[in-house]
Image (cartoon, grey):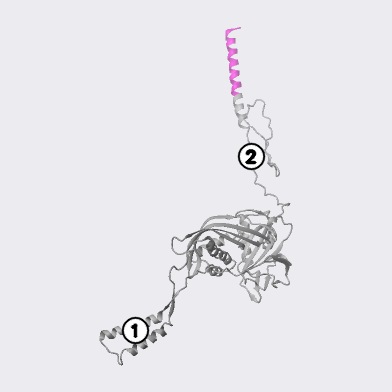
Amino acid sequence: MPKHSLTSHWCSCILTIFLVLGAVVPFAMQAQDTIKIGPLQPLQTLPSLGPAVPVLPQTKAPVDAPMVPPVTAPVVTPPAAPPPLPTSSSLTNTGPIAQAYLYIEPYQTRFEVIFDAATVLAWLAPEAVMPESLSAEQQKQIVETMASRSSDWCALSVGDQKLQVPMPLVEVIKGLPGNTLPLKEGEEVALNQALVGFMWEFATPPGPDEVSVTWKGWIKGTPKLPLRVFFGPLSETGEIHSTVKTFRWRNQGRMTRPAPLAAVPQIPLSQPWSLPLGGVLWLIGGIVFYAYLKRKDHKLPGGSLPYVAVWLLGAVLMSQLLVMPVHLGPAAPAVTQVDEAQKIVSPLLRNVYRAFDHHAESDVYDVLARSVDGELLRKLYLETIQALTLDGREGTRVTIAEFSATVDKVAANPKGAGFVVDCNWMARGIVGHWGHSHPRVNIYNARITITPVNDEWKLNGLEVQEVRRL
């Protein structure tokens, strides 16, 4: 084969290889930039199983195309569906609810009415769609709206006297009448577990003979309002109709009046010495008059004997006038025995709790002032109010039914008259509201200062060491 032919053949082969490479490389680059993975399908979600993992469809690439790294699609999490309404809970209501309670207690009467939240919402916004649950913000809106609209729904009178109607306390609570739970701050509640409660508190006599309550809040055509009356340990049922809007309760001697306050312990003073102030002043006047005559060298007409006789007679008569008792010795006897201190401390502490049987703040202060003195009066008022109020957003006050105190140690008051005791006491009370009752037992351990004030022993200092709530 000629030499030039071989050279031409190899040149042709090399040229062919370059041409093939030049064509293949651009084709490969174009294939990598334009790979198609097909249309994405919408995400499928099963509510009971949560979001599913998206599956991309398989796409066949050209045989001669290079391998491409798999494309990972972002996982989209749909918004969480609201939980279904409970159906088996003992706190679930299955229909409209309307129930009233009348609590007649010493010095105050409380009227409460409960509706289911669905009825209240349907009355406020008939065309609105009912929500699955009530958020904290929705609860707040219901409370504010119903508080303004229900201000004149209730009226109460004792005998023939109509009482001033206070602003109602409106709350959203959970459960059923007689089986309710307070909601925590910010807690959401299912609609078929939510109730709207209205409460009015009236200051009344300690044992009213007759109480009449009138109801005007007939929302959404409610024809009647079942009512249960609680008085002392007893109760009875009744009903208020939309035609006869007033219910009358008569005592008829079934509700006992509260026991009187304990007597404030008196300070036994020593027998006073009588000072005849009138006779003393007469004698001093006579001596001054006699000294004046001697100084001026004056003579009494008729002699001094008649004047001395008149002066002594006047002294005898004046000794019966302006007689003042004078106590000698300490103002109050020293209390050093536990038994003595027990008889003083126990009635004073008992009266502190009995003061809060009253509803009006001025009446509470007046009763407290009988047993408490000084700055402790204001402090005890605030702290006892807090101790006797239920937790949460329900402001009902506990009435103390049982009280006992024990003095463990007695010492002299280092700051003045009186004495200091280490004491513990128990206060047990119970309060009913929304158709059920709450027991409350508080146990205190404290150091108490007792001082004499106007011939009486009074609480003057209180330092709580320990509080236990059972």
Quarter the C terminus occupies: bottom right
Residue neighbourhood size for the residue with mark 2, other residues' Cα within 10 Å, grouped as few (<14), some (14–19), many (≥20): few
Who is closer to the viewer here, 83 or 376? Answer: 376
Whether residue 372 is situated above or below residue 24 in the rendered picture: below
Q: Main secondary structure of the magenta part?
A: helix
Task: Looking at this view, name the residue that lies furthest to the bottom.
Answer: 302
Q: Name the residue: 58% across, 16% down.
A: 14
Disc number at residue 286?
A: 1
Give x and y (percent) for residue 46: 71, 43
Q: What is the quadrant of the N terminus in the image?
A: top right
Q: Is residue 22 magenta?
A: yes
Residue 154: mark: none
Identify which residue, 325 or 312, lies in the foreground: 312
Residue pictured at 46% horizontal, 61% vertical: 413
Q: Quadrant of residue 347?
A: bottom right
Which residue sits at x=58%, y=8%? 3
- What residue did someone put label 2 on? 75
Indicate whether 467 appears above or below 320.
Answer: above
- Tell me if I can see residue 396 in this picture: no
Q: Tell how many labels.
A: 2
Q: Which residues are magenta?
A: 1-23
Whether the residues at callouts 1 and 2 have beta carbons within 8 Å, the answer is no
Q: Position of residue 241 (x, y in %)?
A: 73, 69
Q: Tell me the kind of residue under disc 2.
A: Val
